[in-house]
Amino acid sequence: MRLRSVALLFALAAALAGCNDTIESSFDPAKISNKVEQPLPSRILEQMRVKGMERTAPIAIRIFKEEGVLEIWKAKTDNRFDKIAEYSICAWSGRLGPKVKEGDRQAPEGFYPLTPYNLQPNSKYFLAINTGYPNRFDQANGRNGSNLMIHGACSSSGCYSMTDAQILEIYAFARDAFKGGQKNIQLQAFPFRMTADNMARHSHSEHYDFWKELKVGYDNFEVTKRPPEVNVCEKKYVFNQQVETGGAFNAAGACPVMSTPPQLSAALASYQSAYARDFDKAQKKYDGKMWYDPTEAERKALVANLRKGHDLAFAPTGSALKAGKLMSIKDVERAAAMSKAAAGAPAPAVADAKMGRLAPQSTAAPGVLPLAAADASTAVNALPVPQPNPRTETAAITEPASIARKKPFWKVWATE
């Protein structure tokens, strides 16, 4: 039985020394004459030139909570994506795990399609991009909440907050991509990089079954270097699935007859084979241990000194990796028993160290993982793969050009 609550560990956490190097104290927003149209800096434009990217080519945004990183990936002329920028997230609230309801202070995890209407130029937090939470996945699973943003000001209550200097560039990336004709920018928000080691380290989490679903989309991106096509049926995410004629996706309804393109299926099988070997090694390394996911307060304790000289709204949070720690399951059991005994309640069962591990993806249904009833979580708007941009930079944001892609998404890379 997997451990279903890390709340048992609150009393065991210790604040660790550390710092957040993302705070730009010299940036003055008042000196920006037009923040909405502020061009990207020349250093980034030069990187685009070297990587073979057009300024208005499509982008994808990837967030990794535990690492505290937001990445911008951009399409090259061959229509594969490459990372063009990486930013340290200044503040995100809550702990690892998805947002479930209004007021829980959790930052969203999942796949979210952003349109030009998600851009918030008049945000009180300098600039903002609405994540689109709740998407169809969240709605199908009864999750709710509103106004979950990526914004400036370095203060979060369920959002991903950046410094003003960072959000100025992130906003410019999105603005230029929409001007180039991209209809949907895919936001991928993960609890951590979904490597074999990280999945094994977090296998006792109550959110583990949900994270296994997200990993399927993560794997598809790693294999193709293109944002996966995302749909929802039976309250679960499905990625890069072809549907038979007449079939349709219904977030809460039965899945249609669908299949994974053969070339993609073969590539995923090879990727999963290597993953399974790495996961087996990680299992042995973490046998009898579990990871303590720190609270927001514990993370903030790492950067308390950075708040000196700033107003009260300035609230950076530290690294979840630095504030968290690996613990013996025996120590967890002992602490849980003592805590419950002091409260006059029976001690709950603690997960076995060997349970809750991620098995290789089934070859019977590549791209789809079975859903655990207790942690049902799945649904997002249909998300077409970004299409090649027109050779113009003057397209109106509200009326993006519609350009047909040259090849189906699974053939773009299969011929290489």
Image (cartoon, grey):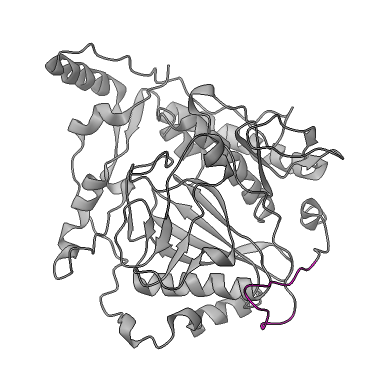
**Vertical placement of residue 405 versus 193, above or below:** below
Residue 227 vertical position relative to residue 106 in the rendered view, above or below: below
Q: Which residues are magenta?
A: 391-403
Q: Is residue 234 magenta?
A: no
Instruction: Determine the residue positioned at 63% across, 72% down.
Output: 398
Q: Please report the residue visible at 80 percent of the width from the left and 40 percent of the height from the top.
A: 243
Q: Nearer the viewer, residue 337 or 258?
A: 258
Residue at the image point whose x is 21% and y is 18% from the top = 334
Q: Is residue 318 visible?
A: yes
Q: How many labels were placed on the picture?
A: 0
Query: In this orientation, which residue lies closer to the viewer: 61 or 53?
Result: 61
Q: Position of residue 298 (x, y in %)?
A: 22, 45
The furthest residue to the top = 346
Q: How far from the left and from the top, in percent, is residue 309? A: 14, 71
Where 58 sits versus 298, above or below? Answer: below
**Image quarter (top left, top right, bottom left or bottom right) of the C terminus:** bottom right
102 horizontally vs 378: left or right: left
> Is residue 394 rendered magenta in the image?
yes
**Outermost residue toward the right in this view:** 245
| Relative image position of residue 406 (x, y in whole percent) | 83, 64
Secondary structure character of the magenta stretch overall? loop
Q: Is residue 320 left or right of residue 57?
A: left
**Residue 6, percent from left and from top:** 31, 30
Q: Is residue 17 visible?
A: no
Left or right of 81? Residue 314 is: left
Kindly indicate the quadrant of the structure image that contains residue 216: top right
Report the quarter where the N terminus lies.
top left
